[in-house]
């Protein structure tokens, strides 16, 4: 399951054996967070969890239409990785399960929820919906509905960072299903040839839609997928936010030093179906509950905070605060107007012709 140990060194990560005479990143160590840092990680993961729960409710009420893919269970990945990036400098791009990544990059929950409900105040003016959100200001470039398409676009973002010499890094997320797409490997090849500053992130939540990774992938140790392109790979416990942050530190250091791309495989798990329309009958309730009981990233962080002296009452207060933020975001979305019909013709072309 998601929390099975992958670390021979006991540090929460493992790497493919280095080929002869080829430099590799150092083995990641679990991040030693201060109490305040761990509290912030906990707060961000809880915000994503509560936000997604509310999105699921609004979908059930018919206030969110179309496809909607929730991030519940995978919160430690976006929070752990993006906490190591520099907002406004480093670029992030992902697929259609994108709400959590936006929240982890500091984007206002109100404009995300407004976008989900198709309102004018949404971050894409209500025209993108769940799968197609975008913020140039935050250097968050989507939200992409085509499986694996964002990997090539992320490689382009990395090329831009290198061409401009701005010191930025691109982080391109994709899933275990997208890891079998051809454009992913074309991107790997170019990224290594040009030593682009990109971190490729495979969020392996064990199921490509309804097919387990073991049935869909001949090589199911996905961190090895870059080796034939000389891209080093690291496998990480994606249910442990500190293990994720530790791997992010290693990856960011490698890429910023100009050594080219790195591939991270985050072993994680989604509690809900692939999308809101997926009844998830391909796995048992017992399987999902076992992961919740043994590996939940938020509960794991909660226990560590309690060990650091944070009281249960203090953690309950944080939960109340987060629930209030999410409730306000939902109220804002529900009371915001829908876009004017003329909005259909904006943002189609860069300039006016």
Image (cartoon, rainbow, N blue to C red):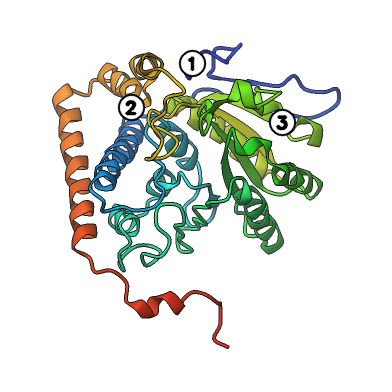
Badge 1 density bin: few <14, some 14–19, many ≥20, Cα 10 Å: some
The residue wearing badge 2 is 298
Contact? badges 2 and 1 (CB < 8 Å): no
332 and 45: which one is in front? 332
Cα distance between the residues tagged 3 and 1: 21 Å
Secondary element at tag 2: helix
Which of the two marks, 2 or 3, is nearer to us in this view? Answer: 3
**Where is residue 32 shown, x and y percent of the image?**
44, 25
Secondary element at tag 1: loop
Q: Quadrant of residue 46?
A: top left
* Residue 25 in view (yes/no): no
Secondary element at tag 3: loop
Residue drawn at the location 81% of the way across and 32% of the way down:
228
**Where is residue 242 shown, x and y percent of the image?**
45, 27
The residue wearing badge 3 is 225
> Would residue 97 be found to the left or right of residue 264 on screen?
left
């Amino acid at each position: 399951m998601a929390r099975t140990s992958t670390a021979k060194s006991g540090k929460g990560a493992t790497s493919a054996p280095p080929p002869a005479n080829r430099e590799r990143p150092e083995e990641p160590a679990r991040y030693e967070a201060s109490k305040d840092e761990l509290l912030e990680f906990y707060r961000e993961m809880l915000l994503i969890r509560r936000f997604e729960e509310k999105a699921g409710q609004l979908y059930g009420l018919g206030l969110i239409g179309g496809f909607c893919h929730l991030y519940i269970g995978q919160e430690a990945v976006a929070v752990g990785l993006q906490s190591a990036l520099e907002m406004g400098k480093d670029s992030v791009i992902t697929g259609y399960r994108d709400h959590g990544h936006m929240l982890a990059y500091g984007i206002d929950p109100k404009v995300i929820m407004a976008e989900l409900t198709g309102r004018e105040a949404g971050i894409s003016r209500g025209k993108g919906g769940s799968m197609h959100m975008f913020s140039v200001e935050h250097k968050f470039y989507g939200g992409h509905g085509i499986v694996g398409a964002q990997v090539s676009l992320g490689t382009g973002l990395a090329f831009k960072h290198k061409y401009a010499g701005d010191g930025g890094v691109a982080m391109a997320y994709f899933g275990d299903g997208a890891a079998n797409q051809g454009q992913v490997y074309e991107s790997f090849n170019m990224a290594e040839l040009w030593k682009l500053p990109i971190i490729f992130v495979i969020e392996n939540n064990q199921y490509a839609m309804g097919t387990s990774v073991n049935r869909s992938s001949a090589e199911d140790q996905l961190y090895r997928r870059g080796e034939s392109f000389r891209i080093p790979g690291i496998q990480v416990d994606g249910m442990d936010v500190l293990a994720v942050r530790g791997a992010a530190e290693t990856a960011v250091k490698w890429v910023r030093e100009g050594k080219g791309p790195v591939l991270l495989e985050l072993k994680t798990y989604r509690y809900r179906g692939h999308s809101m329309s997926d009844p998830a009958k391909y796995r048992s309730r017992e399987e999902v509950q076992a992961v919740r009981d043994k590996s939940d990233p938020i509960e794991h962080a909660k226990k560590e905070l309690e060990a650091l002296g944070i009281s249960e009452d203090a953690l309950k207060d944080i939960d109340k605060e987060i629930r209030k933020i999410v409730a306000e975001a939902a109220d804002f979305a529900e009371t915001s107007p829908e876009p004017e019909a003329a909005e259909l013709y904006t943002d189609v072309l860069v300039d006016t012709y």
